[in-house]
Image: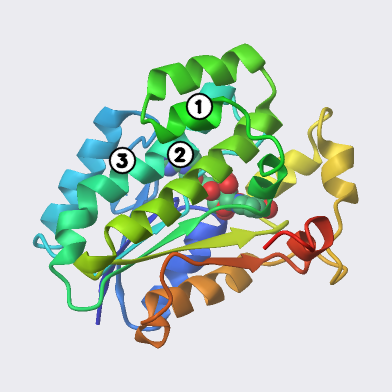
């Protein structure tokens, strides 16, 4: 059975992914700020390097899977933190762990994006280009100057999705598959905090998917389990929306 590192494993979607993989017999190395095999802060390069070093040690240098779930929502303490955790907390970790993944026979990475990324397709905010050019400090400054956490959030997820799709093309020959799951509204502590926020709560509560309900973390874990499995052996660079029809409602001609 495989060894998979899961970021954000202490709560919500990451916890559901970790549980489902463990129940299927896989070894999970959870990475989080607390209650995890690897306790690390993915908001800094130092924390990401520490996390990668520990994962490599725990997996004896060969990793079969990486699932990047750690993230902050619109109630995060700052927009710069959203940029650092949501974008760089995934992209730098992927870079650091890619050599260990490339040693496996059927390696796969799944990134948790968001249906919110689609909000940036019409007019991408300039901070996206700063993220894509790997300039963390400039992207953080641009996000804090804008002081609109919902834009920092959608921008971080749009940049992350674009980066991963580019990486899927350039690193495809290494055999490491890389896909994105884009959740809609999922009942987790992050979503609960957004619903209760005085700035965004009403909009979040009114954002109902065509299917008529919010999703459960286990429904995202189902998609992740598929993407990480040999059944998805030809799925690479794809975005799977698990959103109750939200993206179809918002952008039905844009695919
Ligand atoms: P959550 O708050 O329940 O879990 C997020 C986890 O990330 C927590 O365990 C937290 O400790 C960890 N984390 C945050 N900052 C970290 C840091 N600096 N270092 C290490 N770990 C850190 O949230 P969730 O809803 O399960 O979110 C998981 C992912 O799903 C996020 O990337 C989020 O953007 C994405 N997402 C969630 C929804 C939703 O409606 N819940 C929708 C779309 C996308």
Q: Which mark's residue is nearer the viewer, 1 or 2?
A: 2
- Which residue carries the number 1 mark? 81
Above or below, 192 against 220 in this view is above
Q: Is residue 22 shown left or right of residue 79?
A: left
Q: Which mark is residue 92?
A: 3
Identify the image quadrant of the C terminus: bottom right
The residue lying furthest to the bottom in this view is: 231
Tell me the residue at 82%/45% (across/down).
Answer: 204
In this view of the protein, which residue sits in the foreground, 191 or 254?
254
Q: Earlier in the sequence, mark 1 or mark 3?
A: 1
Q: Which mark's residue is nearer the viewer, 1 or 3?
A: 3
Tell me the residue at 62%/72% (across/down).
Answer: 219
Task: Estimate the x, y position of residue 213 in percent, counting from the top left.
Answer: 83, 66
- In the structure shown, which secondary structural element does the residue marked by tag 2 occupy? helix
Task: Estimate the x, y position of residue 146 in percent, counting from the top left.
Answer: 65, 16
Q: Is residue 132 shown left or right of residue 39?
A: right
Q: How many marks?
A: 3
Above or below, 202 against 43 in this view is below
Task: Estimate the x, y position of residue 211 in percent, counting from the top left.
Answer: 84, 72
Is the C-beta of the residue carrying label 2 under 8 Å from the nearest atom of ligand 1? no
Q: How is the image coloured?
A: rainbow
Q: Which mark is residue 200?
A: none
Is the C-beta of the residue carrying label 1 under 8 Å from the nearest atom of ligand 1? yes
Label 2: few (<14), some or many (≥20) within 10 Å? many
- In the structure shown, which secondary structural element does the residue marked by tag 3 occupy? helix
Task: Estimate the x, y position of residue 193 in percent, counting from the top left.
Answer: 71, 40
Q: Quadrant of residue 77?
A: top right
Above or below, 8 against 144 in this view is below
Is the C-beta of the residue carrying label 3 under 8 Å from the nearest atom of ligand 1? no
- Which residue carries the number 2 mark? 87
Tell me the residue at 89%/39% (across/down).
Answer: 202
């Amino acid at each position: 059975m495989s060894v998979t590192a899961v970021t954000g494993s202490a709560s919500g979607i990451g916890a559901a992914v970790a549980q489902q993989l463990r129940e299927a017999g896989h070894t999970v190395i959870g990475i989080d700020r607390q209650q995890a095999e690897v306790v690390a802060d993915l908001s800094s390069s130092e924390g990401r390097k520490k996390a990668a070093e520990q994962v490599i040690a725990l997996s004896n240098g060969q990793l079969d899977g990486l699932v990047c779930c750690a993230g902050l929502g619109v109630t995060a303490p700052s927009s710069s933190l959203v940029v650092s955790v949501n974008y760089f907390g995934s992209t730098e970790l992927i870079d650091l762990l890619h050599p260990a993944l490339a040693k496996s026979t059927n390696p796969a990475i799944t990134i948790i994006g968001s249906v919110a990324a689609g909000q940036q397709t019409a007019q991408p905010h300039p901070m996206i280009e700063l993220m894509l050019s790997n300039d963390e400090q400039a992207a953080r400054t641009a996000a804090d100057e804008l002081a609109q956490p919902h834009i920092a959030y959608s921008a971080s997820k749009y940049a992350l999705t674009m980066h991963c799709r580019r990486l899927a093309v350039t690193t495809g020959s290494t055999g490491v598959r890389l896909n994105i799951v884009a959740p809609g509204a999922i009942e987790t502590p992050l979503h609960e905090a957004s619903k209760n926020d005085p700035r965004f709560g009403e909009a979040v509560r009114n954002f109902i998917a065509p299917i008529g309900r919010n999703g459960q973390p286990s429904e995202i874990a189902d998609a992740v389990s598929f993407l990480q499995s040999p059944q998805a052996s030809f799925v690479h660079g794809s975005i799977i929306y698990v959103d109750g029809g939200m993206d179809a409602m918002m952008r039905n001609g844009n695919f």
